[in-house]
Amino acid sequence: MTQHTEVDLVVIGTGGAAMSAAIHARLEGASVVAIESGTLGGTCVNVGCVPSKTLLAAAHTRHSALTNPFSGAPSSAGMVDLSALIEQKDDLVGMLRQTKYADIAAAYGFDILPGTATFTDAGTLLVDGRPVRAKSYLVATGAEPHVPAIPGLEQVDYLTSTTAMELTELPASLVVIGGGFVGLEQAQLFARLGVEVTVIGRLAPHAEPELSSELRKAFLAEGISVIGDRAATITQHEGLVQVTTRNGKDATGERVLVATGRTPRTEGLNLPAAGIATDERGFVIVDEQQRTTNPAVFAAGDVTDVPQYVYVAARTGKIAAHNALGHDERVDYTGLPSVLFTSPQLASAGITEASAIAAGYRCACRFLRLSDVPRAIANHDTRGGIKVVADADTGKVLGIHALADTAGEMMLAATYAITAGFTVTQLADTWAPYLTMAEGIRLTANLFRNELPTSCCA
């Protein structure tokens, strides 16, 4: 590493928020050093988005072959070689870690210093005991799987979303604790690879109820058992793990996977010594400028209490870097999209009906089943639906939500519409290409003025 006396910005971490901050600081002409105590790249490329989505793609490909609705074009699928899939996943991760992280740092001209960062006071940061000085610091250390205090959990060899993607042999059966994004993706991933899966928890509890209900039906139709309750105790019997819920229901599996959210990764940073406050869950507290309670230290990404998406991490990292260099910028979350990469996908942009009502809007909503969307009919897959949430007084679109196999791809148009301030009338009258799933957004918006059935061409 190049020897630095003092740089403009020290970034702790090399994940989405950290890399974005370093890149944008360099674009401003600032000198930057990034510090990494573990594997270059953080959560997304190593143990999050990239590995999970490529394995999901493999599982969905196999499932599509087994459930092909076109009898005139038969398909089949054999047994799964998990070790080969994991090797292919690891090759992809390694390639992206090099091209999107190591090569990017070299291209933008900032050093990555290996070591563990520790604050000793409000203005001193040590890396493996050696001081690294900067005008400003950014904490972007991300988060890791949360392990809940369930009696008996520590006595079993449980999996997390990280270790589950390191398996080389499939268990015969799996109990997934948690009905959020990670739990549902992992549950369907293993079920479609041939594992008997039970999910414990409310499925997609923060999604629109019409859509989470349809997703539950889709899971049940695939043979995934769902227990909408909380895990209370865990015991082991004859090599199997038994999870008992608060209401006394039991689920048994060869392995148990814990997917109950993520907790900030701040161990070893010694944040109190630097005057950096955290909330009751350990997330670093920041203001609208991403500044911590120490004016010289900023924080961004999953280590703060923001939606845990890589694009949010990247945006907060960018804003933090700009503000550390003297700007005054804030993150605008209007129209924020999210995607649950199950099949069908559960995706949203903007706010839900419940959030709109809580915010004081007089709410108007319309829901369209996919059985009324021509693309879904042509695909012989009408699972799901689309919901548009609007301000009843102005007609302004507040949220667009969908459960469909390409719902995630629909959300860019939804985000554009919301951030542009479209009304439902404008949304209904905007061009939409026929026989696309995204056309369903226009069809749903049209229900605000006419709830009669429509022709394919109306």
Image (cartoon, grey):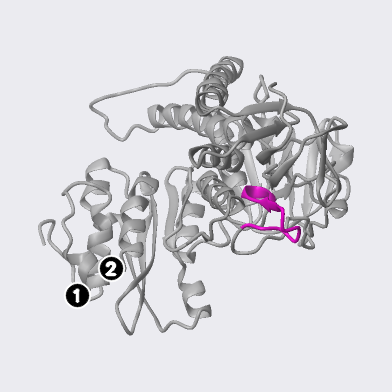
User: Which SS class for mark 2?
Assistant: loop
The quarter of the picture where residue 16 lies is top right
Q: What is the crowding at mark 1: few (fewer than 14 residues within 10 Å), some, or many (at least 20)? A: few
Please give the residue where the numbered disc 1 appears in the rendered image.
450
x and y percentages locating residue 419 in the rendered image: 35, 63
Kindly identify the amino acid type of the residue bearing the numbered disc 1: Asn
- Decide if residue 426 is in sight here: yes
Q: Going by the picture, which residue comes out furthest to the front?
A: 5
The quarter of the picture where residue 3 lies is top right
Residue 302 among those drawn in magenta: yes
* Count of labels in the image: 2
Q: Residue at x 51, y 72 (%)?
A: 355
In the picture, which quadrant includes the N terminus? top right
Q: Which residues are magenta?
A: 290-303
Please give the residue where the numbered disc 2 appears in the rendered image.
422
Kindly identify the amino acid type of the residue bearing the numbered disc 2: Phe
